[in-house]
Image: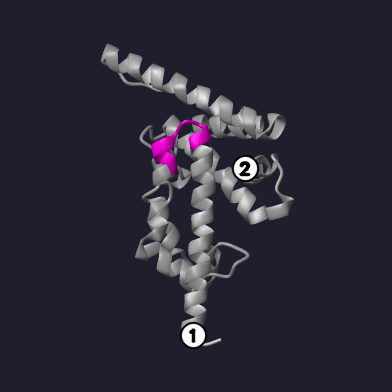
Amino acid sequence: MSLIRKYVSNAYHHFMTISRHKWEVGKNCFRCGRYRQGILHDLSKYGPAEFLVGVKYYQGDRSPNDAEREDKGLTTSWLHHKGRNKHHLEYWVDYDVTRKKTGMVGMKMPDPYIVEMFCDRIAASKIYQGENYTDESALKYFLGGKGKVMLHPYSAKKIELLLTKLAEEGEDEAFRYAKRYMKAYKRYKRRKKTEGKTGRI
């Protein structure tokens, strides 16, 4: 296969992969009542900074980010992506303002982005695991990395709760719960705005 044909093939397959993922996340977000987030999810993947890297390192059976990391020692596409998409825990990593710890720690994620992260993890698990996917897949993946990432305790508790709902009660109940959760969040935010205060549930 010539280099041009390979590039065109990679571009097509990478486009289809990220579009399938975006479609799956969008459906999940809509089931949670997060319509705007479902539409805007991962749009940065279609920009040149991320898309061209994805095409270059496309392999079909794993993330191009892994291949770029092995080749360069870092992932330019991922560094670009995580800095622009608030549903990634890495977006919320910053220096500890309490000074109780040195270095960087996970900040508290706003609840809407925790729900979008929940939707994202389900979609990613389905795409990467294919026929091996079960309702427990996303929870198992999360628990396998627990303690290895800089995730705020509040954010960790909430995402684990949602993933456990999915594993134990299935998609329909998990999405219904997330939708009720977001409705309660909106009521709380409206009440706080009326009171002239800010806060989260």
Tell me if 160 is positioned left or right of 23 in this view: right
Position of residue 171 relative to residue 18, above or below, is: above
- Classify mark 2: residues with Cα within 10 Å, few (<14), some (14-19) or many (20+): some
Position of residue 91 relative to residue 97, above or below, is: below
Give coordinates of residue 180: x percent, y percent: 52, 22
Q: Place residue 111 in its image quadrant.
A: top left
Disc with the residue nearer the chain's start (1 vs 2): 1
Q: Residue at x 45, y 47 (%)?
A: 90
Secondary structure of the residue carrying numbered label 1: helix
Q: Residue at x 54, y 30 (%)?
A: 158
- Classify mark 1: residues with Cα within 10 Å, few (<14), some (14-19) or many (20+): few
User: Looking at the picture, which amino acid does disc 2 mark?
Assistant: Phe
User: Looking at the picture, which amino acid does disc 1 mark?
Assistant: Leu
Mark 1 vs mark 2, CA separation in Å:
38 Å
Secondary structure of the residue carrying numbered label 2: helix
Q: Magenta residues, as a range?
A: 30-38
Q: Residue at x 65, y 41 (%)?
A: 143
Tell me if 131 is positioned left or right of 61 in this view: right
Within the magenta stretch, is there residue 146? no
Give coordinates of residue 48: x percent, y percent: 36, 65
Q: Label for residue 3?
A: 1
Position of residue 146 relative to residue 44, above or below, is: above
Q: Place residue 97 in its image quadrant.
A: top left
Q: Mark 1 or mark 2: which is in front?
A: 1
Q: Main secondary structure of the magenta part?
A: helix
Give the labeled residue for mark 2: 142
Relative depth, front residue between 23 and 61? 23
Q: Outermost residue, right direction?
A: 132
Within the magenta stretch, is there residue 32? yes
